[in-house]
């Protein structure tokens, strides 16, 4: 069964298939649109340092044929053959892209996908639609990248500009006069790899059109050969993607009938309306007639005509409300319905709309983050009380640390009161307006104070780590170390700063948030009787000195815990 990817998801190729000879198919189409689908072979700096590894319609294969362009087949708009164990060492990433040839925008495409087939069986698929893009003219679909092992990432990132702009972005040069494009021949590029030559035109849905079998047996790599022929139709989603749809808000009341009114100066109500957009009337008058100026706060309203005792004054507490015209409703009266003239509710709230991206973790703003449960079946652990909203069927349970964990937490000050979130839906996390920062770990480790942890994937391993030191109470400091593959959400007071580790890097132990696990930490204590007893003491009693190889870092917040 093929593994479904969402934009931003990553996985090791070895977790998808044990094979290294892969078929990559791309389906992307739209009414009146033509796409150039290409593969860029990039170096460690993500640059196209060798033009021979730009595989496109005019250069259908790399020198050693580790990347081959196969053409449209098996329902795919374009397809490639990638042999991972033949790729030379200086090629560290393969980026599959689609660029418009001619007028149009990527937002006009229908449902499409990028899929990986190994041994005749589809093992991975990343699906996308035009609604995920806007005015872009190209899209980076997916990457094969080498990070100790080959991995796959579903990118789905739009790009302004066409194929030439993509080429320049990767550091390539555009020839002044390009040769006439020649269609790739699958018989020469990869003999026996493509479907039979009698295959029909590609269909939008997955499957190989029925055709006579080739005389020679097909190798164990290639697209599936036993799928029935399917008529052209849009692919049906396997399950509703609730995490892609934003939350909608409807107006509280229908707007009134529009009427021609001259625009009022900015910040001033229109004639005949109060500051809230409601029609004002003069007692005994008609709707739309401009009301007299309201008296100062706390003063009774003058009578009609300017003579006689004041009317509409404040009533005694024991009597029911006697209201001024246009005053807030009360005493069983119903509110007036706004009658046009102002921006609609949707316009006012548009800047606060939910931000759906299809990823598992999505920051909604600098202080609120959302996690989509059920994408890959991974539960989430979060600080108790940090949930502010959830949608769907989500279960919240207490996550105990066990007897040993409680003893260690109490002794070190690194105890975390956690809850476990499982089910299908979306959960929003925040705490005391703190800034939130998702950190994705790919097998590496990071040290974070327990007070700075908001939530994390249950797949991450965490333990208390001891920092040795002399001259401070207890003789040591402690922190939490997180390691594995998943996302850790850290909270800070204010916007933090990330600094590289150098031999002269010191940080206040009360302001440090996190640091790379590869850093060497040394406690530098300034506690002394003289400094505590006399004026002029700096107030900084415990500092941490960091040492490490290039690439190590620390994170400091503008706040002391």
Image (spheres, rainbow, N blue to C red):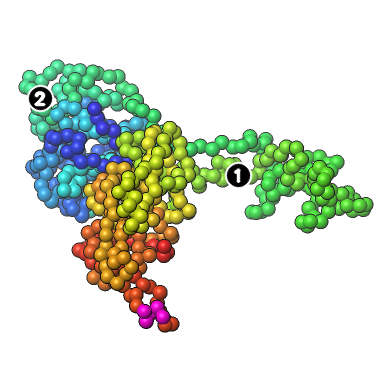
Residue 430 locus on image (x, y percent): 45, 49
For residue 340, what is the image quadrant? top right
Residue annotated with mark 2: 218
**Looking at the picture, does residue 530 appear above or below residue 457?**
below
Mark 2 to mark 1 CA distance (whole Å)? 64 Å
Q: Is residue 546 left or right of residue 350?
A: left
**Looking at the picture, does residue 322 appear above or below residue 467?**
above
Q: Which residues are magenta?
A: 529-533
Q: Residues within 10 Å of mark 2 (few under 14, many from 20)?
A: some
Nearer to me, 510 or 255: 510
Nearer to me, 122 or 59: 122
Quadrant into which the N terminus falls: top left
For residue 559, what is the image quadrant? bottom left
Residue annotated with mark 1: 343
For residue 116, what is the image quadrant? top left
Quadrant into which the C terminus falls: bottom left
Residue 537 locus on image (x, y percent): 40, 79
Q: Is residue 531 magenta?
A: yes
Q: Is residue 59 left or right of residue 341?
A: left
The residue at the point 91 percent across, 52 percent down is 309
């Amino acid at each position: 069964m093929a593994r479904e990817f969402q934009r931003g998801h990553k996985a090791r190729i070895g977790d998808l298939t044990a094979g290294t000879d892969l078929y990559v198919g791309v389906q992307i189409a739209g009414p009146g649109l033509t796409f150039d689908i290409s593969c860029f072979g990039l170096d460690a700096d993500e640059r196209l340092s060798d033009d021979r590894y730009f595989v496109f319609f005019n250069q259908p294969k790399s020198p050693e044929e580790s990347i081959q362009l196969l053409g449209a087949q098996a329902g795919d708009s374009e397809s490639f053959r990638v042999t991972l164990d033949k790729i030379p060492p200086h090629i560290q990433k393969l980026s599959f892209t689609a660029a418009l040839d001619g007028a149009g925008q990527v937002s006009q495409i229908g449902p499409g996908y990028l899929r990986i087939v190994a041994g005749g069986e589809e093992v991975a698929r990343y699906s996308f639609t035009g609604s995920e893009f806007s005015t872009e003219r190209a899209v980076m679909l997916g990457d094969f990248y080498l990070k100790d092992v080959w991995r796959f990432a579903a990118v789905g990132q739009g790009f302004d500009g066409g194929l030439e702009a993509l080429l320049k972005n990767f550091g390539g040069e555009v020839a002044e006069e390009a040769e006439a494009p020649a269609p790739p021949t699958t018989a020469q590029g990869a003999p026996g790899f493509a479907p039979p030559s009698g295959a029909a035109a590609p269909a939008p849905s997955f499957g190989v059109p029925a055709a006579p079998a080739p005389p020679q047996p097909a190798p164990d790599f290639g697209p599936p050969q036993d799928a029935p022929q399917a008529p052209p139709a849009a692919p049906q989603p396997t399950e509703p993607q609730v995490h892609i749809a934003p939350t909608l808000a409807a107006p509280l009341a229908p707007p009134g009938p529009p009427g021609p009114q001259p625009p009022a100066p900015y910040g001033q109500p229109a004639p005949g309306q109060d500051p809230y957009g409601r029609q004002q009337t003069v007692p005994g008058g008609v709707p739309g007639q401009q009301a007299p100026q309201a008296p100062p706060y706390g003063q009774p309203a003058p009578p009609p005509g300017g003579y006689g005792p004041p009317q509409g004054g404040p009533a005694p507490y024991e009597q029911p409300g006697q209201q001024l015209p246009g005053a807030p409703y009360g005493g069983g009266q119903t509110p007036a319905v706004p009658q046009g003239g102002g921006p609609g509710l949707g316009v006012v709230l548009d800047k606060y709309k939910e931000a759906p991206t299809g990823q598992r973790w999505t920051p909604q703003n600098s202080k609120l983050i959302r996690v989509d449960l059920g994408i890959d079946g991974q539960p989430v652990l979060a600080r108790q009380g940090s949930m502010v909203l959830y949608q769907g069927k989500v279960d919240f349970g207490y996550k105990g640390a066990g007897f040993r964990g409680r003893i260690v937490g109490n002794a070190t000050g690194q105890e975390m009161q956690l809850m476990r979130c499982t089910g299908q839906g979306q959960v929003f996390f925040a705490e005391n307006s703190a800034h939130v920062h998702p950190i994705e770990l790919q097998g590496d480790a990071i040290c974070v104070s327990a007070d700075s942890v908001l939530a994390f994937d249950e797949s991450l391993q965490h333990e208390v780590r001891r920092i040795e030191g002399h001259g401070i109470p207890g003789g040591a400091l402690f922190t939490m170390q997180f390691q594995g593959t998943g996302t850790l959400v850290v909270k800070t007071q204010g916007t933090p700063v990330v600094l590289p580790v150098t031999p002269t890097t010191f940080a206040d132990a009360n302001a440090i948030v996190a640091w790379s696990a590869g850093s060497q930490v040394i406690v530098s204590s300034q506690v002394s009787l003289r400094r505590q007893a006399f004026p002029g003491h700096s107030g900084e009693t415990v500092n941490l000195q960091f040492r490490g190889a290039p690439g190590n870092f620390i994170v400091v917040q503008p706040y002391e815990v």
